[in-house]
């Protein structure tokens, strides 16, 4: 059944596609200047009190401008990793849609214009506060196929699958779990959406048909993944025309993807999990030795879950429960950190940096050993989230770094990056934080022939080989072992920050594997503990510690010699990295009450609103 664009949308869609085909002129950073003022409104302070603090703590060599303006809007705001997707979300809100409607459209547009992470062939999580103040969490994480088993990727293990091929969990057909994105977006719309489903899909369909202008970021991303993408015929045909990445300024369309989107627009998730699209996925699996079957696809269901909620300095953080580790790990870090008044320690003082690294180390030791899909393992949420447990973990922190080999999970084991992040607030007080992924950049590298979308490589997020690090260096435990139908553990952490009255103060989250957790925490802590505005909170330099490997990663150029020398004196092993995750944020201005937003310049994107 063909999808026909409603007449009342055609003008808006034409404008969107025109924008997609016309890069911003030199010197003009984005279209957000036309969508929302970037200068503070009259009567608001010219700078936050944190400005001088940051100037003292951050070296002049730091490459991200801390004093850059934020995007401000009175009614609603959208942040995503793509200016095209952000503008599509703003257009939905302009037409009277709500935050859930906008998130659905943004996610679908990202599946077209941001193929390294936006997806139909992956999964994710969302945290929602509706206009009445009710909070809930949606789990549309991928699941292990029925034919999977715990030994399928283990080194030297006997297996009936072609699983001992080096890198089989990270690349190729066998690395894919059963996709959840389409079912998840449909569930979000059914419960909270207000505009018709076909309308929300129309921008993505038009962009897939008519194409969009390739920017330097996408050309570079495809080039970086060239060895993987060139292995698969359908991927080469789409992303490597003439055998090389499309040049900046070229137009990239995808007729197969447009037809897939049309089937989903007409039939909802049945247009993906059954019928033509499902047959194309199953056929691709058969050709490439994968194991996702028609029965796996038809059986897939998203899950509504009770979010993790915890108090921090009078605020409430609302985040994802297992099988995401994001909410639990954030709570562990926060509960340890709030034993000190961080503002008194001083931003990025040696004491602040040491405490953050040690809190992260303990949170990841627990995360890696104790968390998994709650349908398969007993997750000790009560003890993990308790104040007494945080106090116990905190007592083990001394003035020196604790070697990771001396830090294990603080509770007995129970028996039994890449992503893209979207934040939206609307004019009625609703907010959605959604993170979606196909795991590594461009997922498995496999494009479904005839369907036009990439499949995930999420099987690598299981404990594929106990004691061995996965794609992101995480060494995980038995709780996350592979089992048919099981959801692999995730680091995604879509999070809402509510003020003491229960209203949304910030919408956070990140992309970047396990660095999602620490980036999300630092951005929100920057807002709460140090009074930073959205731009300062995002652009401030970050650190990351994940238990194993036993090192503290620091963003290069963001830390002074005094800071690094003191951390080394305390026994921390330091490693400089170009950047740590991408964590855009929306923050309510405490003076004006307006929304402010900042995309993360580490990966680009745009914030815009009205």
Image (cartoon, rainbow, N blue to C red):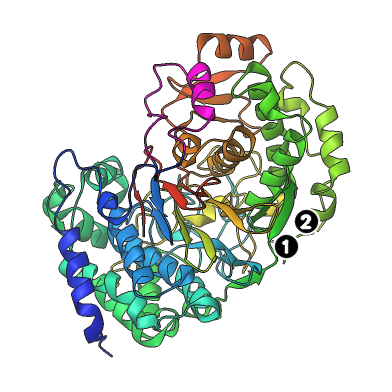
x and y, in percent, of residue 475 in the image: 63, 39
Query: How crowded is the residue under tag 2: few (<14 C-alpha within 10 Å), some, or many (20+)?
Result: many
User: Is disc 2 placed on a helix, strand or loop?
Assistant: loop
Question: Label 1, on which residue?
Answer: 374
The residue at 58%/9% (across/down) is: 565
Report if residue 481 is visible in the image.
Answer: no
Report if residue 418 is visible in the image.
Answer: yes
x and y, in percent, of residue 550 in the image: 63, 25
Q: Nearer the viewer, residue 52 or 439?
A: 52
Distance from Cα at disc 1 to Cα at disc 2: 6 Å
Question: Label 2, on which residue?
Answer: 379
Q: Nearer the viewer, residue 238 or 531?
A: 531
In the image, which residues are magenta?
A: 45-69
The answer to which quarter of the image holds residue 79 is bottom left
x and y, in percent, of residue 123 in the image: 49, 63
Q: Main secondary structure of the magenta part?
A: loop
Q: Nearer the viewer, residue 75 or 447?
A: 75
Dot 1 or dot 2: first in sequence order is: 1
């Amino acid at each position: 059944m063909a999808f026909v664009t409603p007449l009342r949308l055609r003008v808006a869609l034409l404008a969107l596609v025109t924008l997609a085909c016309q890069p911003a002129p030199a010197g003009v950073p984005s279209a957000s200047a036309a969508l929302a003022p970037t200068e503070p409104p009259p009567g608001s302070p010219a700078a936050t009190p944190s400005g001088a603090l940051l100037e003292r703590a951050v070296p002049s060599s730091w490459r991200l401008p801390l004093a850059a303006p934020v995007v401000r809007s009175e009614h609603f705001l959208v942040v995503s990793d793509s200016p095209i997707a952000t503008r599509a979300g703003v257009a939905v809100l302009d037409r009277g849609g709500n935050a859930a409607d906008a998130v659905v459209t943004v996610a679908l547009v990202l599946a077209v214009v941001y193929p390294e992470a936006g997806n139909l062939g992956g999964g994710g999580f969302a945290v929602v506060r509706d206009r009445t103040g009710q909070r809930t969490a949606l789990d549309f994480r991928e699941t292990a196929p029925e034919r999977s088993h715990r030994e399928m990727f283990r080194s030297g293990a006997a297996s009936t699958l072609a699983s001992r091929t080096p890198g089989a969990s990270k690349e190729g057909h066998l690395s894919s779990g059963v996709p959840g994105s389409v079912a998840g977006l449909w569930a979000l719309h059914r419960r909270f959406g207000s505009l018709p489903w076909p309308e929300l899909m129309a921008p993505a369909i038009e962009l897939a048909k008519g194409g969009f202008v390739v920017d330097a970021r996408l050309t570079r991303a495809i080039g970086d993944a060239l060895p993987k993408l060139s292995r698969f015929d359908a991927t080469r045909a789409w992303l490597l025309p003439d055998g090389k990445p499309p040049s900046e300024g070229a137009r990239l369309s995808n007729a197969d993807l447009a037809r897939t989107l049309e089937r989903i627009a007409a039939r909802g998730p049945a247009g993906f999990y059954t019928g033509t699209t499902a047959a194309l996925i199953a056929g691709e699996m058969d050709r490439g030795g994968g194991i996702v079957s028609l029965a796996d696809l038809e059986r897939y269901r998203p899950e509504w879950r009770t979010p993790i909620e915890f108090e921090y300095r009078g605020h409430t953080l609302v985040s994802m429960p297992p099988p995401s580790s994001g909410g639990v790990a954030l709570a562990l870090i926060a509960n340890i950190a709030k034993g000190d008044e961080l503002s008194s320690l001083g931003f990025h003082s040696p004491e602040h940096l040491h405490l953050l690294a040690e809190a992260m180390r303990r949170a990841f030791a627990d995360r890696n050993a104790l968390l998994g899909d709650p349908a398969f393992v007993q997750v000790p949420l009560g003890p993990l989230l308790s104040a007494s447990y945080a106090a116990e973990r905190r007592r083990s922190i001394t003035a020196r770094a604790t070697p990771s080999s001396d830090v294990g999970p603080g509770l007995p084991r129970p028996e039994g990056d890449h992503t893209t992040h979207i934040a939206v607030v609307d004019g009625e007080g609703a907010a959605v934080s959604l993170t979606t992924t196909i795991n590594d950049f461009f997922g498995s590298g496999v494009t479904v022939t005839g369907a036009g979308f990439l499949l995930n490589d999420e099987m690598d997020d299981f404990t594929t080989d106990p004691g061995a690090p996965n794609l992101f260096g995480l060494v995980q435990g038995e709780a996350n072992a592979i089992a048919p139908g099981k959801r692999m553990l995730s680091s995604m952490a879509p999070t809402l920050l509510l003020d003491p009255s229960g209203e949304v103060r910030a919408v956070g989250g990140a992309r970047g594997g396990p660095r999602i957790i620490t980036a999300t925490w630092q951005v929100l802590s920057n807002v709460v503990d140090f009074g930073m505005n959205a731009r300062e909170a995002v652009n401030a330099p970050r650190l990351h510690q994940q238990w194993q490997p036993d090192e503290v990663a620091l963003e290069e150029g963001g830390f002074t010699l005094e800071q690094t020398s003191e951390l080394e004196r305390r026994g921390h092993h330091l490693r400089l990295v170009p950047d740590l995750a991408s964590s855009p944020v929306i923050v309510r201005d405490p003076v004006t009450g307006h929304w402010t937003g900042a995309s993360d310049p580490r990966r680009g994107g745009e914030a815009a609103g009205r």
